[in-house]
Image: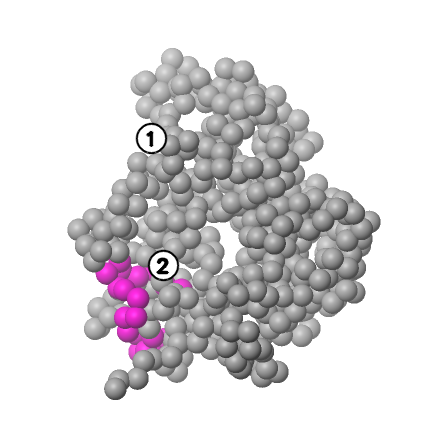
């Protein structure tokens, strides 16, 4: 039996009596004694603190780094100035996602790519294949064994590399497709903490000793000293909170910083609350809303609502892996918006936000029907808590009451549109549901606001 890996914060979790579970080979906290609901609500009202050190952290530097990233990622890395980050996807040639990721540029001469824990090794090996190709890289199709970069070398496209095994650092050779690229896996050297919620900024400001927090806008980056530790800080997160921070710091310093954040008022939160928060925010999870669907088909990247933020066809981007397929998907999506489904073969289903209005909880894999016709399946679903509120606009405030509501994300036929009523098969019972624009809005800081479905009354 393989021993589970532990993050630098394992002892902190045990001291807080966290319930630990196996997640992608890591011994991770799923919840603390107060439970998932309390952690979810604490994040929405105050600040939730998450250990996300199990995620992969790759750095890319060298003269060829930008060309390499432009080729292997879907977003336009050239648009990133130092101090900026962007959501992106690692695509395959058919327009599916090998993984979704975040690209950070804290300093001008280095990028950091954060990937999902479950895909860390797969992503690493995939990226390495592009550093071992010859000087004529294939652009948007797999290499032809007769004419591609492996031709004349017995089918082996690999070229000499310099490897430093201790920190998994690879430098591409001078005659590779992307020369002078240094790819390093720094996942074990760096810890990663996520502090999310309306109180998160005040908590960090209270521990700030040198430097400043990033500018108050999404995806802004900065470097500062917190609680005696130098940290790279990003205004990013996976909860839908308008006030959100992710911290990258030396692994050895992470336990003390965690304790200081908790002492300052942050609520420790586990994987359970992280999942309900991201579901409420309508954010995709690889293996559910991206990757391979429940019927064994590849989910097109453009099926996700976030694809508009993650895929660029701008001229500086140039050719990249999967571009041809993604352009077809994009063209199909534009037609779908105009109620033209003639290109549905390129984009047969879309990830939709669904509010369950009948009695029942929609779980992943549940069939979704329209007029007794199967139109898709639930990809993620559960009951999520929310704070009840009063007032509107500047008078908005949260009360001390909370409730639960059933919500889900579903991969549905592309002709199922917003506002359409559907049914979810919950253990053989047909439960009414409706396709909605979103479950949560985070465009009015400091609070993210739950959007509760309210049917229009017939006059």
Q: Report the residue at 55% width, 76% height from top.
A: 396
Asked whether 430 falls inside the magenta stretch, the response is: yes
Foreground mark, 2 or 1? 2
Q: Position of residue 118 (x, y in %)?
A: 53, 49
Left or right of residue 171: residue 249: right
- Write down the quadrant of residue 293 in the picture: bottom left
Q: From the viewer's perspective, is residue 177 above or below residue 413?
A: above
Q: Residue furthest top?
A: 152
Q: Residue furthest right?
A: 228
Would you name the residue on which mark 1 appears? 141
- Write down the quadrant of residue 429 in the picture: bottom left
Q: Position of residue 157 (x, y in %)?
A: 44, 21
Left or right of residue 236: residue 376: left
Left or right of residue 10: residue 170: left
Q: Is residue 99 visible?
A: no
Left or right of residue 155: residue 81: right
Q: Report the residue at 61% width, 21% height from top.
A: 162
- Write down the quadrant of residue 452 in the picture: bottom left
Would you name the residue on which mark 2 appears? 351
Main SS, magenta region, reads: strand
Q: From the viewer's perspective, is residue 200 above or below residue 326?
A: below
SS label for mark 2: strand
Q: Is residue 212 visible?
A: yes
User: Which contiguous range is marked in magenta?
Assistant: 409-433
């Amino acid at each position: 039996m393989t021993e589970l890996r532990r993050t630098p914060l394992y002892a902190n979790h045990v001291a807080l009596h966290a319930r630990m579970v196996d997640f992608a080979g890591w011994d991770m906290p799923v919840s603390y004694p107060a439970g998932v609901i309390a952690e979810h609500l604490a994040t929405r009202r105050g600040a939730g603190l998450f250990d996300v050190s199990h995620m992969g952290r790759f750095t890319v530097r060298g003269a060829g780094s930008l060309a390499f990233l432009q080729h292997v990622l879907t977003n336009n890395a050239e648009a990133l100035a130092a101090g900026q980050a962007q959501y992106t996807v690692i695509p395959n040639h058919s327009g599916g996602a090998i993984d979704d990721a975040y690209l950070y540029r804290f300093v001008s001469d280095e990028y950091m790519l954060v990937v999902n824990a479950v895909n860390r090794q797969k992503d690493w090996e995939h990226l390495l294949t592009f550093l071992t190709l010859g000087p004529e890289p294939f652009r948007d199709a797999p290499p032809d064994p007769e004419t591609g970069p492996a031709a004349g070398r017995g089918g082996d496209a690999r070229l000499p590399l310099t490897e430093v095994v201790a920190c998994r650092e690879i430098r591409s050779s001078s005659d590779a497709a992307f020369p002078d690229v240094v790819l390093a896996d720094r996942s074990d050297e760096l810890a990663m903490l996520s502090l999310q919620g309306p109180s998160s900024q005040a908590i960090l400001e209270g521990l700030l000793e040198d430097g400043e927090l990033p500018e108050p806008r999404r995806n802004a980056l900065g470097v500062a000293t917190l609680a005696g530790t130098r940290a790279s800080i990003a205004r990013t997160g996976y909860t839908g909170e308008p006030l959100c921070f992710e911290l990258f710091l030396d692994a050895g310093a992470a336990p003390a910083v965690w304790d200081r954040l908790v002492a300052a008022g942050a609520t420790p939160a586990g994987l359970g609350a992280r999942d309900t928060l991201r579901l409420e925010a309508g954010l995709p999870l690889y293996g559910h809303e991206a990757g391979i669907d429940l019927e064994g088909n590849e989910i097109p990247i453009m099926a996700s609502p976030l694809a508009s933020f993650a895929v660029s066809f701008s001229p500086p981007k140039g050719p990249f892996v999967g571009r041809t397929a993604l352009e077809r998907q994009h063209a199909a999506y534009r037609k779908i918006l105009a109620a033209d489904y003639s290109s549905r073969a390129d984009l047969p289903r879309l990830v939709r936000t669904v509010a369950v209005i009948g009695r029942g909880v929609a779980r992943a894999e549940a069939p979704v029907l329209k007029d007794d016709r199967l139109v898709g399946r639930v990809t993620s679903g559960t009951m999520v808590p929310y704070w009840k509120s009063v007032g509107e606009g500047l008078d908005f405030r949260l009360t001390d009451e909370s409730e639960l509501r059933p919500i889900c994300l579903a991969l549905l036929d592309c002709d199922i549109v917003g506002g359409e009523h559907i049914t979810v098969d919950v253990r053989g019972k047909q439960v009414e549901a409706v396709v909605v624009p979103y479950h949560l809005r985070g465009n009015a800081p400091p609070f993210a606001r739950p959007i509760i479905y309210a049917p229009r009354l017939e006059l």
